Amino acid sequence: MKNSFDEKILEEAHDWVKVNQKVILATVIQTWGSSPRPTGSRMIVNEKGDFSGSVSGGCVESAVVRESMGLLKDNKPHKKIEFKVSNESAWEVGLACGGEITVYLEQIN
Amino acid sequence: MKLETLKSIISKKKNKTEFAIITNLSTGESEIFEKEKPLSKELEKYSNQINEFFKSKKNGVIDGTEIFIETYIKPIKVIIVGAVHIAQYLVEFAKSLNFEISIIDPRGYFASEQRFPEMKIINKWPDEAFKQIETNENTALIALTHDPKIDDPALHHALNKKFYYIGALGSKKTHTNRCERLKEAGFSTNQINSIHGPIGIKLGGRSAPEIALSIIAQLVAQTYKK
C-alpha cells in the first residue's frame, strides 16, 4: 500500500492562489539511488520565496526556491531540473545522500 | 497546471475518489484520469501504460516519454470504537496521514460533537453501526473501550471481514480474557493472534497522546506490510 500520507500541499497551493500569490508547484518526478523523498513529493514556492512542503531532505530546496522565483520573474510556465550527487564541496547544492532526483516546476495559472 | 485542474484535484481528494494526474512535461498540460473516463486524444496511445501505473498505484514517468503520472488512492478507512480521550489524539494524527477515521460509540456523552468537531461519529452499538459503513480487508479497527459489550461485537465483525489491522486496548490480563471469549465464540487461534493486543508499539508512555502515537505507529507499520 502506497501513499499513506497526505501533506495537503495542493490544498495549500490553492489557498496561496486565493490570496493572489503567484505559485510554482514543484514535484519530484524521477528518483535514482537513495533519494530522500519518493516520486510525487511536492513543494510550493511563491514570488517572495516563501515555500512549503519538500522535494528532498533539505538538500536542494534552496535551489528549487531560486529556480522557481526565476521562473515567475521571467513568466515561464514550466521547467525540469536534475539534481545529482553532490561532491565534497559543502557549498554546492546537491544530494549529500548520494541519490539523484528530477524535479518538475510548473506555474499554477 | 491550470487553476481549474488544481481545484478539481482538491475536490476529488475531498470526495475520496481514486484518480491520477497525468502531466505532459514538455507542454506543461495536465489532465485528470479516472477509471471510467476516456483519455484525451493526445494520451490515448499511452493508455496501457497509464492503466498499469494506475492499477499498481505508482507514480512516475512512462519510459521513453515525457508523460508523468501521479496516482491518488482512496484513504484507508480506520474505525475507532470508543470516543475516548485517546481517540481525540488519534484524530489529530490521522489528519496528516492518509487515514479516514470513523468513530463508533453508543454512549452519547462520549460521542459529543464538542469533543470531536467535524468528525463522523456514529452514536450506535457496533452491530448497528457497521450496517452503515462499508468494510473490507483494507479496513482497520482500533477498539478502545476495553468494555466487552462494546469492543467484542466490533472485533467479531473485523475478524469476519478480515480487516488488515485489528488492535484492542487493554492490559495483558484484559487481553487474555478477551482471547478466551473470542475462542468460545468460535474464532480460530490464528484469527485471535492477528489482533494486536495490548495495542500499540512499546514506547513506554502512558498518557493519552503517547498511547495514540504508539497506536498510529503500529497502524502505519502494518499498512506498509500490506
Image (spheres, coloured by chain):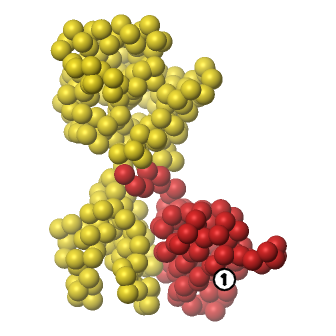
Chain colours: A red, B yellow
Quadrant in which the N terminus of chain B appears: bottom left
Is residue B154 placed above or below B14 in the rendered structure? above
* Apparent side of residue B32 relative to residue A80 in the rendered image (left or right): left
Can you say which quadrant of the picture contains the C terminus of chain B? top left
Residue B201 x, y percent position in the rendering: 52, 29
Residue B86 picture location, percent across and down: 51, 25
Residue at horizontal 26 percent and vertical 14 percent from the top: B182
Determine if residue A5 is in view.
yes
Residue at point 44%, 37% (across, down): B219
Describe the element under mark 1 as helix, strand or loop: helix
* Residue A43 in view (yes/no): no
Which amino acid does the dot numbered 1 rest on?
A: Glu
Residue plotted at (27% across, 19% down): B189
- Report which residue position mark 1 lands on: A67
Q: Is residue A93 left or right of residue B6?
A: right
Q: Quadrant of residue B44?
A: bottom left
